[in-house]
Image (cartoon, coloured by chain):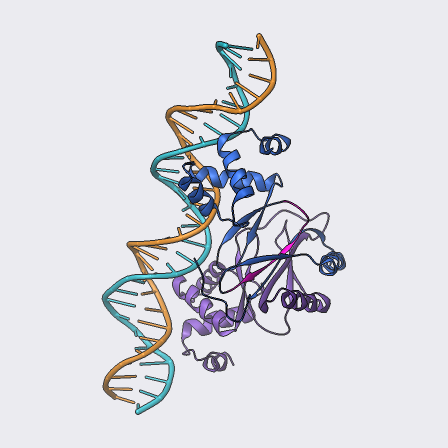
Chain colours: A blue, B purple, C cyan, D orange
Amino acid sequence: MESEELRNVGLKVTTPRLKILGLLENAKAKHMTAESIYRQLGEGGEVIGLATVYRALAQFEAAGLITRHLFEGGQTVFELERGPHHDHIVCIRCGRVEEFYDKVIEDRQREIAEKLGFTLSDHALTLYGECSPSCPEPKR
Amino acid sequence: MESEELRNVGLKVTTPRLKILGLLENAKAKHMTAESIYRQLGEGGEVIGLATVYRALAQFEAAGLITRHLFEGGQTVFELERGPHHDHIVCIRCGRVEEFYDKVIEDRQREIAEKLGFTLSDHALTLYGECSPSCPEPKR
DNA sequence: ATGCTACATGATAATAATTCTCATGTGCAA
DNA sequence: TTGCACATGAGAATTATTATCATGTAGCAT
């Protein structure tokens, strides 16, 4: 249960945190902005302060429960850290996000960092393109 | 000459644009923020409105003269589009930026996009790590 | 169960980064 | 050289995010 997750990372189990975690688990969209989380909770009758949403997301990220992605266009999105690591490909027209994992790339990254004398701690790889020749306009 | 570059992409040759392009070419730091460009020009006696800096950078980017990178920590940096394509590795402690190019990764990206039905138009790959075990704190 | 205390929350102010507005200035083609 | 579309600068406006602070509460110790 979600309460467990919170306790495990040393965070108090509070209603706002449970709501936010719950939404991230059940929402149709896997990648959400702080704003969209705030809005959807509000629409669902769960009014939670925007500041609390930001705080919770920051804590979840620090605890490793979620990941933050800085996609182009200034949209900062959060995603539940579940399952294996993966990177993203974003459609520049409709905004659709697909995930992928490529062992070759992962390995090369580590090698490259090492060769340059860096201790790799993280990486951000996002591809951008059109998801189909007839992709419609953004939904924004 | 820089005037050429501007004319070639259909932009009028103006003093602010030349100054900004010139700074990007000669500055010690290869990756600069709008703010740092504004500040350095000001210190050099070339006072140019901050809004103009932002405008010029946006136009240069649209014209393909420069590239915009969204590194973690909220810093948006610009870099002259010169020489071959490359990606970056950023030190999470001191902020140092190194560049690298890896054909294997580049090729895989194209293959992955294709496999997912996307037409690749761009990508962002940035590695994060510590540049040395004894790296000092940020310089900010 | 009750109280205590550290931590959490919400409303709002504050910041930071970037974009917009608009009156004025200017590159450059005719 | 002149006209006009485009450029500029100063500051207002927006957007995204973080800080402040008075008040509420989870959860441990009674």
The location of residue B87, given as percent across then percent down, is 64, 64
The location of residue B77, given as percent across then percent down, is 53, 61
Nearer to me, B132 or A106: A106
In this picture, is B130 found above or below B117? above
The location of residue D30, given as percent across then percent down, is 57, 8
At a point 48% along the width and 41% down the height, the residue shown is: A54
In this picture, is B64 found above or below D10? below
At a point 44% along the width and 46% down the height, the residue shown is: A35
**Part of the protein shown in magenta:** A82-92
At a point 61% along the width and 38% down the height, the residue shown is: A63
Would residue B3 be found to the left or right of residue C29 on screen? Answer: right
Q: Is residue A91 magenta?
A: yes
Q: Is residue B97 magenta?
A: no
Q: Is residue A124 visible?
A: no
Nearer to me, B131 or A44: A44
Q: Is residue B21 visible?
A: yes
To which quarter of the image does residue A65 belong? top right
- How many marks do you count on the picture? 0
The location of residue A128, given as percent across then percent down, is 57, 64
Nearer to me, B7 or B105: B105
In this picture, is C8 found above or below B78? above
To which quarter of the image does residue D27 belong? top right
Would residue A89 be found to the left or right of residue C29 on screen? Answer: right
